[in-house]
Image (cartoon, helix red, strand yellow):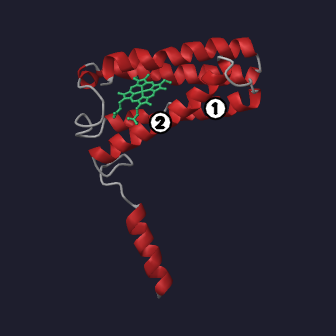
Amino acid sequence: MKKPLTALLCLAVLSVPAIAGNAFVDAEDSIEYRQAAFQLIRHNVGDIAAMVKGEINYDAARVNKRATALATLTTLPWEAFSVPGADKGGNAKAAIWQNLADFTSRSEKLIADAATLKVAADSNDQAEVRKAFGNFARNCKACHDQYKE
Ligand code: HEC
């Protein structure tokens, strides 16, 4: 009977969602999630930036790997802003919830520009990648200036 018990305990640990419709136990959990997502975005952006700036050799396969990751990663943080209480904590400004339509449209633009970056990476055209990356990266500071402490 040892095995079923272990399986049950694992399930108890893994089945955390307590808030209907999402993956978070509470607001703090959702803040941790969105910050973790942003950190992954930062690492992938930083690597492409280093190549685009010529700090390291340009490697098309590596750019493609980063762009592929970013196309998904940029879709992740946003649901973690709609959990009750998620406005208290982290470095998110209250302005987000006062201008939710604007914040959401900025997040959608980031996702769309990441998709364009992925298309550019697939084309293997370095000039296209540079252009798409420039457009993509502009979204970060623009949103942070308004909505991040
Ligand atoms: C639509 C708005 C928006 C866009 C676009 C955006 N961010 Fe953010 N970012 C935020 C907010 C809000 C926070 C604060 C989150 C928190 O503390 O809960 C944040 C936090 C971060 C953090 C800190 C995470 C931590 O550990 O506390 C990093 C790193 C980051 N963003 C990187 C980026 C990069 C890189 C881009 C562009 C590719 C980007 N962000 C685009 C809104 C945005």
Report x, y in % for residue 26.
Answer: 28, 49
* The C terminus: image quadrant: top left
> Residue 23 or 43: which is nearer the viewer?
43
Distance of label 2 from label 1 (alpha carbons): 13 Å
Q: Quarter of the image holding residue 102? A: top left
Badge 2 amino acid: Gln
Q: Is residue 76 above or below residue 2?
A: above
Q: Is residue 116 above or below residue 75?
A: above
> Residue 137 or 100: which is nearer the viewer?
137
Q: Secondary structure at mark 1?
A: helix
The residue lying furthest to the bottom in this view is: 1
- Residue found 39% across the figure and 18% down from its top: 143
- Residue found 51% across the figure and 25% down from its top: 111
Mark 1 lies on residue: 66
Mark toward the start of the polypeptide (2 vs 1): 2
Say left or right for 27 vs 65. Answer: left
> Residue 29 or 148: which is nearer the viewer?
148
Mark 2 lies on residue: 39
Badge 1 amino acid: Arg
Q: Is mark 2 within 8 Å of ligand 1?
A: yes
Report x, y in % for residue 42.
Answer: 51, 30
Mark 1 and mark 2 in contact (Cβ < 8 Å)?
Answer: no
Q: How many marks?
A: 2
- Residue found 32% across the figure and 21% down from its top: 147
Report x, y in % for residue 32.
Answer: 36, 43
Report x, y in % for residue 65.
Answer: 68, 34
